[in-house]
Image: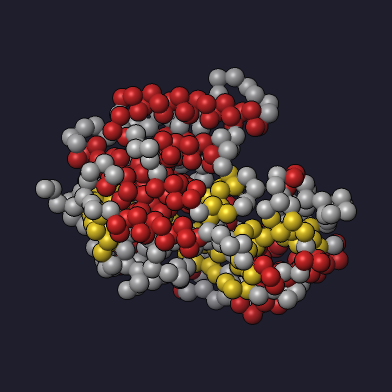
């Protein structure tokens, strides 16, 4: 029997990669440093822990995230299967009970006969065929080892985590349920009138932020995950056109509030809710003071405060070869956010891709090239061909797909056309690479 494949990191990408290999008959030794060592963002030792939002994004094929979900399910994704079994109401998004979701990911992998979970920190790059999915919070020693290999400094952006409150502590007299444009009643909406909004925004601008470590002094934010206070500093109404947008959220009287804070269910029981888009780097005392200016949250119980941490990723166009391998190591594949993608779903996709690339190598076949017309292929193409000088982490979006052959004005219909084209391209790919198809 061949030696197990070494896989470093038990986040979404690492867990997905382990499953993709094991479910195709390849033995895996999955190293996860928690609980022996931890990170500024993790709170458990569970595999697949979600450290930021509990949402995996839109769940319809009329959205780029929905297209990618469909592709991952065709490949037999463990992460998507567990997410669907532990979803919580979130309108058109796929949100999960984060603890139950992570527990099932952990149990599934620990019970698989071809997966050995090793609770040790890896401080050097593994020898032989391996996948490095150590994540954006890669430990300093392993990050240094990777830096020495690729000959390039990491790029870094700051990521932030939103607070969570108990539902029973939210004032029902000053909040109401409903999703934007009437898509269900899954969110709790906390309205603000204009004077309250102005005072809230000013408090954010003047608030004291948590101190950063020396290596974090050079501030660099990822635009898709800005701290709420940074958004507030960019203008009087930037919050109202961003996370506090009231459009499509009329109150029970039918009037649209001046601004709205949305709360999204965070666990299956519906007892915990997170503040949507309220990632923050404020001191915890400041969070208590300022977030209670939101009328419905005046007496809220915050069970988790917002925190901020540094995320690391490589400059993929410079250091990766198009198959997620650092130049100079044909048997080592990177996976997850460290590759330069952003988001839970995208990280999962890179875990699946790395596993299938490695599997092809074990089979003695040419590494498969995912079609550009698929979401997965478009993400991989972005990592390979983006401009190195301006490279930034990328979510799946229509802008990275090849253009349609015809113009479609309606965004919904346009996205649906991308989805149909993607599914057809993936089926053609799987006809040539049937071993890539996941089991049902």
Name the residue: 54% across, 39% down. 66
Q: Nearer the viewer, residue 27 or 100?
A: 100
Residue 270 is left or right of residue 309, and the answer is: right
Residue 322 percent across, percent down from the top left: 34, 39
Residue 234 visible to the viewer: no
Q: Nearer the viewer, residue 301 or 398?
A: 301
Q: Quadrant of residue 115?
A: bottom left
Name the residue: 35% across, 28% down. 430
Name the residue: 85% across, 62% down. 193
Residue 80 visible to the viewer: yes
Q: Nearer the viewer, residue 88 or 150?
A: 88
- Residue 153 position (above or below residue 403): below
Q: Nearer the viewer, residue 261 or 198?
A: 261
Q: Residue most toward the top?
A: 406
Q: Quadrant of residue 414?
A: top right
Residue 142 is left or right of residue 271, and the answer is: left
Q: Tell me the quadrant of the picture where the C terminus can be found.
A: top left
Q: Residue most toward the left?
A: 1
- Residue 191 position (above or below residue 59): below
């Amino acid at each position: 029997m061949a030696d197990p494949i070494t896989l470093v990191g038990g986040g979404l990408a690492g867990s997905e990669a382990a499953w993709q290999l094991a479910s195709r008959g390849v033995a895996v030794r999955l190293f996860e440093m928690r609980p022996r060592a931890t990170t500024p963002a993790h709170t458990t030792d569970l595999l697949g822990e979600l450290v930021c939002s509990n949402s995996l994004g839109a769940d319809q094929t009329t959205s780029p995230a929905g297209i990618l979900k469909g592709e991952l399910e065709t490949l037999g994704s463990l992460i998507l299967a567990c997410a669907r079994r532990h979803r919580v109401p979130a309108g058109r998004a796929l949100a999960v009970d984060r603890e139950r979701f992570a527990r099932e990911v952990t149990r599934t992998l620990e019970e698989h006969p071809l997966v050995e979970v090793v609770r040790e920190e890896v401080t050097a790059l593994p020898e032989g065929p391996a996948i490095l999915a150590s994540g954006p919070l890669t430990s300093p020693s392993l990050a240094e080892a990777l830096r020495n290999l690729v000959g390039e400094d990491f790029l870094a952006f700051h990521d932030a985590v939103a607070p969570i409150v108990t539902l029973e502590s939210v004032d029902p007299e000053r909040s109401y349920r409903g999703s934007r444009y009437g898509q269900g009643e899954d969110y709790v909406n906390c309205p603000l009138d204009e004077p309250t909004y102005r005072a809230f925004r000013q408090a954010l601008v003047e608030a004291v932020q948590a101190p950063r470590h020396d290596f974090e002094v050079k501030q660099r934010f990822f635009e898709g995950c800005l701290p709420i206070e940074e958004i507030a500093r960019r203008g009087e109404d930037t919050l109202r056109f961003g996370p506090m947008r009231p459009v499509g959220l009329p109150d029970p009287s039918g009037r649209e509030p001046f601004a709205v804070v949305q709360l999204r269910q965070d666990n299956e029981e519906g007892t915990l809710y997170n503040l949507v888009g309220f990632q923050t780097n404020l001191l915890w005392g400041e969070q208590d003071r300022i977030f209670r200016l939101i009328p419905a949250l005046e007496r809220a119980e915050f069970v988790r405060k917002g925190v901020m941490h540094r995320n690391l990723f490589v400059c993929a166009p410079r250091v990766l070869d198009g198959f997620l391998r650092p130049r100079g190591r044909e048997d080592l594949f990177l996976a997850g956010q460290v590759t330069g993608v952003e988001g839970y779903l995208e990280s999962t996709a890179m875990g699946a891709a790395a596993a299938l690339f490695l599997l092809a190598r074990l089979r003695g076949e040419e590494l498969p090239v995912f079609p550009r017309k698929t979401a997965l292929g478009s993400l991989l193409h972005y990592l390979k061909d983006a401009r190195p000088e301006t490279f930034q982490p990328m979510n799946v979006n229509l802008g990275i797909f090849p253009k349609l052959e015809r113009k479609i004005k309606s965004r919904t219909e346009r996205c649906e056309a991308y989805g149909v084209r993607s599914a057809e391209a993936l089926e053609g790919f799987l006809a040539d690479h049937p071993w890539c198809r996941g089991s049902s």
